C-alpha cells in the first residue's frame, strides 16, 4: 500500500485536466439538484461518483484534490489484492501480488484519473475478499457485507456487475455446498435489483458510448499487455509463463482466473453486437493477473528451493534460502519497475492525455480580446471554458443559449440554427475553439447547429490567425470582403491531416481523434 500510495502521488499535479476529468470537475461543483437533473438527462451511470466528488470538492475545488480519491482507492486495492493472496496461499504470494498490482503501469494511470474506475476496482476487490469470508463463515449474515459492497460498487459503474459471473465461476470451481450457493444467490439478487433502475435510465442515454467500436483481437492483446507488470519486453514475456504456473495453485486460481477472464470476455462478446468495451471498464480484472503471476513466482521459488546441490538438499524453510529468495524477488520487482519508468513518466505527462484544457484556456487568455465572440466547434469544446473559466471570462460565447448547470447538460444548450445565423451576421470577427477532427473536410456532423457553424464560417469568413495547443486549434475568423470568393483550402493544423489514418470517437466528454493502432501502439499502453 505504501508503494502504491507513493506511485499514485508521484506527479499527481500534471498541470491540466483532460476532457473526462473536466466533466467530473465541473459537474461535481454543481448543486445537488443540478446534479440530480443531469443524471436524468445525460449521465446516470456516474451519478453516485458525482455525488461523492461533490462532497470531496466542497473541501477544496482543485485538480489534485479531484484525483486524490482515485489515489486512495488504488492504495486500498493494492492492500486488498495482498490480502487475497495471503488468504488464498500465504504471506509471500500476498506481498508479491500487492506489489505487482502497485507497479503495473495501468494501475498507476487510473490511480491519477479523476474518474470512478479506481474506486470500482477497490470495490470489486473488496467484494471478492468478502466472498471468501462468507464462504468460510457459511452463515446467512456473512453475505450482507458482500452484497452491500458490491451493490455500491455497481452503482459507481454498472458494468462492475459482470463480476457476479466471475464469482459464480469461483464458487463452481471451489465446489461449495448448496447452502453457500443459496446465500450467494440472495446477495446477487439484491445487487441486481438495486442496479435495475440505473440500467433502465442509462439505456436511454446510450448515446454517451456511441463512440465505442467493436473490439477485435488487437484490443484483447492490448488488454493482456496492460494487465502485466510491463506491456512489452522481459516483464511481459516472463509474466505469461508465471501466470500459467500460477494456475497450479488451485484455490488461488479458482478466484483469480475467473476475475481475470470473465468480465473482459463477456464484455467483448457482447460488444460484437453492441459495442460497450473499453479497457478502463474492466480495470478491476487486473487484480486476477497480479495474483496469478505472484502465485506462479511463488511456485517457481519453491521448486528452486528443493533443488539438490552436491547431494545435499536445500530446504525452502531454511532461513538463508528464505532471505535469498526474498532478496531475489525484491530485486526482480525493482528491476521491473525501473524498466517501466519511461511508461510511468509518460502517464504523468499532460501530453499523454487526449487533450489539455488548461493549455487551451491559457492560449485563449493570451490571444482573445475582451468582448470577442467565441464559437466552440463542436460544442463539447466548451469544456475548456467550464473547467478553466479564466481564459474565457471576458469573451462572449456567441452560440450559447442556456448554461450547462441550468440546462442539465454537460456543456450547455446552444441556439437554434436560425438564431445562430442571426448572431453570426452581427459580428465581423469571431474566434473558434475547434477540435482537430472538426477541421477535417470529411467530418459531417449530424447536429444541424454544427452544420450551420461550418457553413457560415466557410461562406462568410476567412481565417486570419491560427494557434494549435493541447489538441485544440484556435482560429480567428474575419468577415470576408464583398465579392471575395469563399476559401477552398483550409490552413494546415499539423494534426489529423487527410492523408493520415484516424478515427473519430465520441465519449462522455465528446468527440476525439484516435489513430488506428500500429504495432508500436499495441506495445505501449495508451490513455483512452
Image: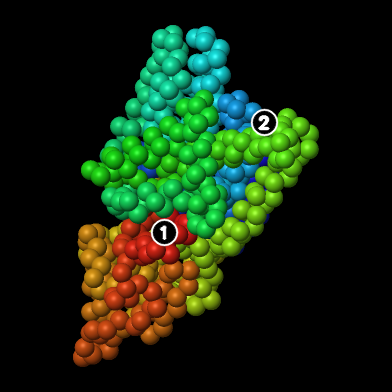
Q: Vertically, is 207 above or below 382?
A: above
SS state under label 2: helix
Circle 1 is placed at which residue position? 522
Residue 449 is left or right of residue 463, and the answer is: left
Q: Is residue 492 left or right of residue 232?
A: left
At 51% from the left and 73% from the top, the residue drawn is 363
Q: Residues within 10 Å of mark 2 (few under 14, many from 20)?
A: some
Who is closer to the viewer here, 456 or 150? 150
Relative to 123, is 206 on the left or the right? left
Q: Earlier in the sequence, mark 1 or mark 2?
A: 2
Contact, mark 1 vs mark 2 (Cβ under 8 Å)? no
- Name the residue at the front extreme: 311
Give the CA distance from mark 1 to mark 2: 34 Å
At 24% across and 63% down in the image, what residue appears?
445
Along the viewing direction, whichever of 57 and 168 lies nearer the viewer? 168
**In the image, residue 241 lies at what x, y percent?**
50, 44
Residue at the farthest right position: 319
Asked where in the image residue 172 lies, by quadrant, the reply is top left
Query: Can residue 216 be seen in the rendering of this structure?
Result: yes
Packing grade of label 1 (10 A; few <14, some 14-19, many >=20) is some
Q: Would residue 348 be seen by someone viewing this image from the given angle?
A: no
Which structural element holds mark 1?
helix
For the C terminus, give its image quadrant. bottom left
Counting from the top left corner in percent of width and height, residue 317 is at 73, 30
Q: Position of residue 6 (x, y in %)?
A: 68, 49
* Residue drawn where x is 43% and y is 17% of the image: 175
Q: Which residue is identified by label 2?
A: 91
Relative to 229, residue 458 above or below: below
Residue 162 in the figure: left or right of residue 118:
left
Q: Residue at x 34, y 83 (%)?
A: 491
Amino acid at each position: 500500500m505504501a508503494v502504491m500510495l507513493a506511485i499514485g502521488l508521484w506527479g499527481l499535479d500534471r498541470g491540466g485536466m483532460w476532457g473526462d476529468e473536466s466533466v467530473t470537475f465541473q459537474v461535481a461543483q454543481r448543486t445537488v439538484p443540478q446534479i440530480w437533473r443531469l443524471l436524468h438527462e445525460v449521465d446516470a451511470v456516474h451519478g453516485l461518483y458525482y455525488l461523492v466528488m461533490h462532497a470531496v470538492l466542497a473541501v477544496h475545488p482543485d485538480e489534485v484534490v479531484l484525483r486524490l480519491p482515485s489515489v486512495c482507492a488504488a492504495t486500498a486495492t493494492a492492500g486488498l489484492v495482498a490480502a487475497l493472496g495471503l488468504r488464498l496461499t500465504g504471506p509471500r504470494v500476498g506481498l508479491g501480488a500487492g506489489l505487482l498490482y502497485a507497479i503495473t503501469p495501468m494501475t498507476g494511470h487510473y490511480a491519477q484519473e479523476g474518474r470512478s474506475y479506481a474506486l470500482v476496482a477497490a470495490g470489486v476487490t473488496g467484494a471478492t475478499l468478502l466472498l471468501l469470508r462468507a464462504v468460510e463463515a457459511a452463515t446467512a449474515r456473512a453475505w450482507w457485507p458482500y452484497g452491500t459492497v458490491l451493490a455500491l460498487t455497481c452503482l459507481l459503474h454498472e458494468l462492475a456487475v459482470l463480476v457476479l459471473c466471475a464469482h459464480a465461476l469461483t464458487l463452481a470451481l471451489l465446489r461449495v455446498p448448496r447452502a453457500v450457493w443459496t446465500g450467494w444467490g440472495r446477495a446477487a439478487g439484491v445487487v441486481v435489483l438495486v442496479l435495475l433502475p440505473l440500467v433502465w435510465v442509462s439505456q436511454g442515454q446510450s448515446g454517451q458510448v456511441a463512440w465505442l467500436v467493436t473490439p477485435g483481437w488487437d484490443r484483447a492483446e492490448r488488454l493482456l499487455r496492460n494487465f502485466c507488470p510491463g506491456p512489452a519486453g522481459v516483464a511481459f514475456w516472463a509474466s505469461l509463463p508465471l501466470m500459467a504456473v500460477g494456475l497450479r495453485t488451485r484455490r488461488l486460481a479458482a478466484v483469480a482466473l475467473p476475475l481475470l477472464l470473465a468480465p473482459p470476455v463477456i464484455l467483448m462478446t457482447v460488444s460484437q453486437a453492441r459495442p460497450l468495451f473499453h479497457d478502463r471498464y474492466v480495470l478491476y480484472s487486473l487484480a486476477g493477473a497480479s495474483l496469478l503471476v505472484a502465485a506462479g513466482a511463488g511456485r517457481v521459488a519453491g521448486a528452486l528451493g528443493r533443488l539438490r546441490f552436491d547431494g545435499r538438499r536445500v530446504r525452502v524453510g531454511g532461513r538463508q534460502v528464505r532471505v535469498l529468495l526474498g532478496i531475489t524477488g525484491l530485486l526482480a520487482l525493482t528491476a521491473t519497475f525501473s524498466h517501466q519508468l519511461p511508461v510511468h513518466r509518460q502517464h504523468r505527462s499532460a501530453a499523454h492525455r487526449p487533450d489539455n484544457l488548461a493549455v487551451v484556456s491559457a492560449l485563449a487568455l493570451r490571444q482573445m480580446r475582451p468582448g470577442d465572440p467565441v464559437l466552440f466547434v463542436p460544442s463539447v469544446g466548451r469544456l475548456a471554458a467550464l473547467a478553466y473559466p479564466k481564459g474565457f471570462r471576458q469573451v462572449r460565447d456567441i452560440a450559447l443559449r442556456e448554461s450547462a448547470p441550468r440546462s442539465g447538460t454537460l456543456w450547455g444548450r446552444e441556439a437554434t440554427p436560425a438564431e445562430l445565423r442571426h448572431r453570426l451576421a452581427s459580428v465581423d470577427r469571431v474566434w473558434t475553439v475547434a477540435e482537430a477532427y472538426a477541421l477535417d473536410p470529411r467530418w459531417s456532423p449530424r447536429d444541424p447547429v454544427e452544420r450551420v457553424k461550418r457553413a457560415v464560417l466557410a461562406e462568410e469568413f476567412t481565417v486570419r490567425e491560427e494557434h494549435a495547443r493541447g489538441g485544440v486549434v484556435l482560429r480567428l475568423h474575419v468577415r470576408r470582403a464583398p465579392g471575395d470568393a469563399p476559401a477552398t483550402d483550409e490552413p494546415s493544423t499539423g494534426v489529423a491531416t487527410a492523408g493520415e489514418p484516424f478515427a473519430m470517437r465520441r465519449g462522455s466528454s465528446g468527440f476525439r481523434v484516435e489513430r488506428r493502432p500500429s504495432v508500436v501502439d499495441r506495445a505501449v499502453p495508451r490513455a483512452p
